[in-house]
Image: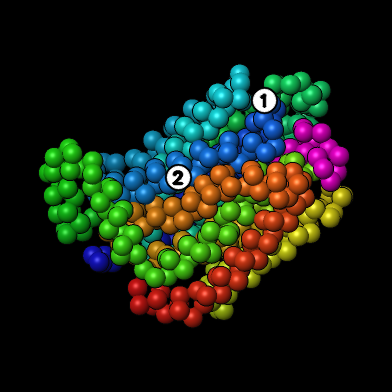
Amino acid sequence: MHLIKKPSLSFWQIFNMNVGFLGIQFSFGLQQTAINPVFLFLGASEDMLPILNIAGPVTGLVIQPIIGAISDKTWSPRFGRRKPFFLIGAIIGSLCLFAFPLSPALWFAVGLLWILDVGNNMAMEPYRAFVGDKLPEKQLSLGYQMQSLFVGAGIVLANASIFLFQDWFGGGDVADVAGSIPKWLYYSFFIGAFLSVATILWSVLKTPEIPPTENEMREIKEHNALSFVQRFNMPFVEISKAIKEMPPFMWKLSVVYLFQWYALFVYWQFITPLFMHTMGFDLSEAAAQSAKMSTTYNISTMVVALALVPLVLKIGSKKVYAASLLGTGLALFAIPYISDPIYVLLPMVFFGIGWAAMMGIPYTMVSKIVPQDRRGVYMGILNMMIVIPMGIETLTFGPIFKSLLGGNAVNAILFAGVFFVLAAVFSLRLNVKGEKEEKMG
């Protein structure tokens, strides 16, 4: 491992460094809350939703580790190491967000989702590594929890825009027309297209990257001297090597992620259909209610994200993580049995605490134990641990929902709650051994 002494950054420097996550997560918020309703508006059936979301797992599995490995071997005195990748990704995402509500048919929207996911994944992974590159170990927790804050803020803005625009511009009558996307949904996507680029530019212009060490620069030059075929193959070689040498802690974390992310994908896909069953809402009303749910839990995330930093230091990252996952599971057990659209928002406070932990704590732990010069590829591998469960969910949950759960969205949400409880149980395995491995790293 090539060590480099990193200066401590001020609170506002860390803030500016993470502003770009606002735009990325606005886009992600639309994927959570608006894209599945768009598919339903364009004629998809509920049991089709998992397979229609296969783009996220596939592109995440392919794009993030490859971009991470490439960025590890990249340096430009003018543009830096990570910033060119998340700027290009933001531009791709912006163009797709602008076009998405104009989709004339289901196949067009599904195709755009694939391209949007490529852009978002291209931006996401180098951004995770960017924070680890810049911060000394003592500030990693603050850096990644600041990302959690912007994760919450971006998704809050995305989802608030959905139900506010529906309230301001109406949409119930349009939503009843088969194959039609309500006009009130357009504005959220247009705002996301602007924020995707604008916030990334803020961070790019405000935050210089740390130049590579002499050893890292030598490795980059040696890499650039290789033939095109060798350079093309190198990311795959790096990914394979990194997986073989992956710290035991990450293997344990992968088990937690299997249940955690499978459950999250189920929730995002079936929370809108749930309200059509439990509250008798039409599709527009259900989409607006699910946006309110997401807004509530992401406000909770914003409030508690930085508060988790001293709590983690006091009682340990893994205990906080396990408790947060358990609280998320309990929230999902409660939601299907609350028929009031206001009271059903209360469990989302616990969901938001869990989301804050999920978006910060694992990245802090992993960033401490992986080599500086391979942080990009390992952050990409960490994302593989996210998208593989999502991929499994998209391929398996449609038949499970239809055959085993009776095609009932209530049962789908309860199923997700069980998986969160299992994730909490497996995260307890990280406690003692995981902390020892972190210290060894």
Q: Is residue 400 left or right of residue 221?
A: right
Sequence-wise, the earlier of marks 2 and 1 is 1
For the point 70% across and 21% down, which residue is it? Answer: 180
Color encoding of the figure: rainbow
Per the model, the C-alpha gap separating discs 2 and 1 is: 25 Å
* Percent position of residue 82, x then y: 34, 47
Per the rendering, the mark at residue 118 is none
| Furthest-top residue in this view | 104
Of residues 207 and 132, the one drawn nearer to the viewer in this rendering? 132
Residue for badge 1: 42
Q: Quadrant of residue 170?
A: top right
The residue lying toward the viewer, choosing from 137 and 402, is 402
What amino acid does circle 1 point to?
Leu
Which picture quadrant has residue 204? top left
Residue bearing mark 2:
60
Give x and y (percent) for residue 314.
Answer: 55, 78
Indicate the quadrant containing the C terminus: top left, top right, bottom left or bottom right. Answer: bottom left
Q: Which range is magenta?
A: 276-294
Above or below, 317 against 373 in this view is below
> Element at badge 1?
loop
Label 2 Cα crowd, 10 Å radius (few <14 / some 14-19 / many 20+): many
The residue under the point 73% across, 31% down is 165
Task: Say what amino acid the circle numbered 2 marks.
Answer: Gly
Q: Is residue 142 left or right of residue 66?
A: right
Q: Main secondary structure of the magenta part?
A: helix
Helix, strand or loop under label 2: helix
> Residue at left 55%, top 70%?
427
